[in-house]
Amino acid sequence: MCPSVVHPNLKEGVLEARAYQLEGVAESSQSSTLLVYPTAGGKTAVAVMAMAETLHRHTGAIVIIAPTVGLVDQHQKTISEWLVSDFASVSLTGSTPPKKRENVWKTSRIVVTTPQIYRNDVLSGLIVPSDIRLLIIDEAHHAVGNHAMALSADLHIAKGGERILAMTASPGFSRDHIRSICNRLSIDRIHLRSSDDPMMKEYLSDLDIVEIRVEIPKELLELAAPIRGWQRSIVDVERRLGRYVHEGAIGYAGLSSAMERAQAAIRRGDGTGYASVSRIALAMTLNHLINHLLSQGVAAAREFLRRKSADLDLKKKSSRDLLKDRRIRSLIQKLEHMREVHSKIGSVRRLVAERLRRNNDGKIIIFATYRDTVSAIHQALSDISGANPVRFVGQANRGESGLSSGEQIETINSFREGRYNVLVATSVGEEGLDIPSADLVIFYEPVGSETRTIQRRGRTGRRRQGDVVVLIAEGTRDEGAVSASLRRELAMKRSIHSVRRGLTSGPIDYSLLDSFNVSRDGEFTKADSFISEERSRHAAHLSEERNSVTFMEDEEDSVLSLSDPSSFRPRGQFGLEDFKK
């Protein structure tokens, strides 16, 4: 029998005792903390234990904000299942009228809501942040810029709100981005555990990642040929002007570099730069269209051109000029009534049919970027024996069909309960969805973002072994996206360690866990003693992990020092930067 956590405000036996999670509770009880665990590592368990302790020690309210209505509903249900019945949680969304929200804020100690609602209700005076003892921010990587989550945190801090517990599996790959999150949320500590951490590893299910490469159908290559020729003719002009300098296949990196050169020419007073900027912008648009067609298929290309048509309402000259061209008009006509022919559709069908044949109780999630692609995949799966697919997309916008917040919740609940066994989702399904029995995730295309890759990957392997399959169209941007995501994921780990070193947080105060015990076969152990035992059990592996972290940080320091030109030339020798005016 697994040891379980015992606390006055937790229902008996609902939470398995894990030492690293109790460490997270101790850190978050000390000061505002950024909690970074891989998906299924137990961020929600740490949050609920932190809530239980806050309710035990303090009066005042606790607020949890999550970016989607689906996540709000999920958190509210989890809290109800894990906390004792004395503390009922209430969820607030945009569908809750302000008058009712006012009463909820006055009478409830635990409120789960979206950042938009929290911000609006603080601004309107329905809630006073200084009355809140703990603000929990889920998917905290959004807390930057003008995102509602960041603006909510700004108000919370400015108006006297207390501790913040911010949670994410993927805070971003750059130190500046992670630092920005920490600054915005007034974070004092980062509690980080990776899937390789010895104290966590034994609790995580195995995850097999398989890449399947597919050939692009002849029909799509023929459709793309005129557009590719048009793009080549533009690039040839820019090569002669010395602005496109990259060798090999035309890609975003080469076009972006050419754009920088054209803009630099304008700053120097070279009038030819204006025409170059216009041509390169067109080549970039064509590059996007080609990638949609070859790496995703008919539906994605059709949706891309439809969005460009909608841009006409915004009086964009570039969109008007693009859509006037005979090659684009011809492509639109051909795509209009064309069925999906991309090889990836056949691969998805085979993968789904094979998985359901082996396990007719299994659940599958398929991620695609565009709604039209989701619809095409959904339709392609409708005649597979044993498959009962459902679409899961965001809310309607700009004339596109979508799901309301209520429909999103209903769809996820239906999938979780088994009424559907294949969920075909856009990015709205990437974050936080706890669907324990999803044992296969298919990426219709790889994404270059490490955050989105980690979030997508985390939809499987949460309770048992899961598989991730990534479909890659040969000779397209898919190949670059795979390597970009891997590079950024490694950079993310280095960046988190670097930012954490810069926070003067001090050692963990385990006395803050005095209210927690661990039950093992009817015997009770204090939480701090349990942590000490677990650390001793894993001592050898923890030492290896620390050495690995130290090596990663030392390697980063050496790279940073080499980035300074003065570090690799003899002392006293001048460099060009020394002669800047």
Image (spheres, rainbow, N blue to C red):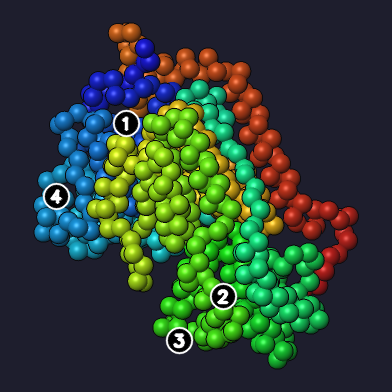
Residue at position x 15%, y 60% from top? 98
Query: Vertical placement of 108 versus 523: above or below?
Result: below
Distance between the Cα atoms at labels 1 and 2? 57 Å
**Residue identifier under label 4:** 104
Quick one: 524 or 426, which is closer to the camera? 426
In the image, which disc is placed on residue 49? 1
Q: Secondary structure at mark 3?
A: loop
The reply to whether dot 1 and dot 2 touch (C-beta < 8 Å) is no
Distance between the Cα atoms at labels 4 and 2? 54 Å
Residue at position x 55%, y 18% from top? 538
Mark nearest the camera among 2 and 3 is 2
Give the left or right position of residue 578, taking residue 483 as reference. right
The reply to whether dot 1 and dot 3 touch (C-beta < 8 Å) is no
Mark nearest the camera among 1 and 3 is 3
Few, some or many residues within 10 Å of mark 1 (<14, 14–19, 20+):
many
Amino acid type for the residue under numbered disc 3: Lys
Quick one: 267 or 351, which is closer to the camera? 351
In the image, which disc is placed on residue 331? 2
Q: Secondary structure at mark 1?
A: helix
In the image, which disc is placed on residue 233? none
Query: Vertical placement of 194 versus 18: above or below?
Result: below
**Residue identifier under label 3:** 315
Distance between the Cα atoms at labels 1 and 3? 53 Å
Quarter-wise, where is residue 196 in the image? top right
Mark nearest the camera among 4 and 3 is 3
Which corner quadrant holds the N terminus? top left
Amino acid type for the residue under numbered disc 2: Leu
Amino acid type for the residue under numbered disc 1: Met
| Rendering coords of residue 264 (x, y %) | 70, 80
Residue at position x 59%, y 53% from top? 343
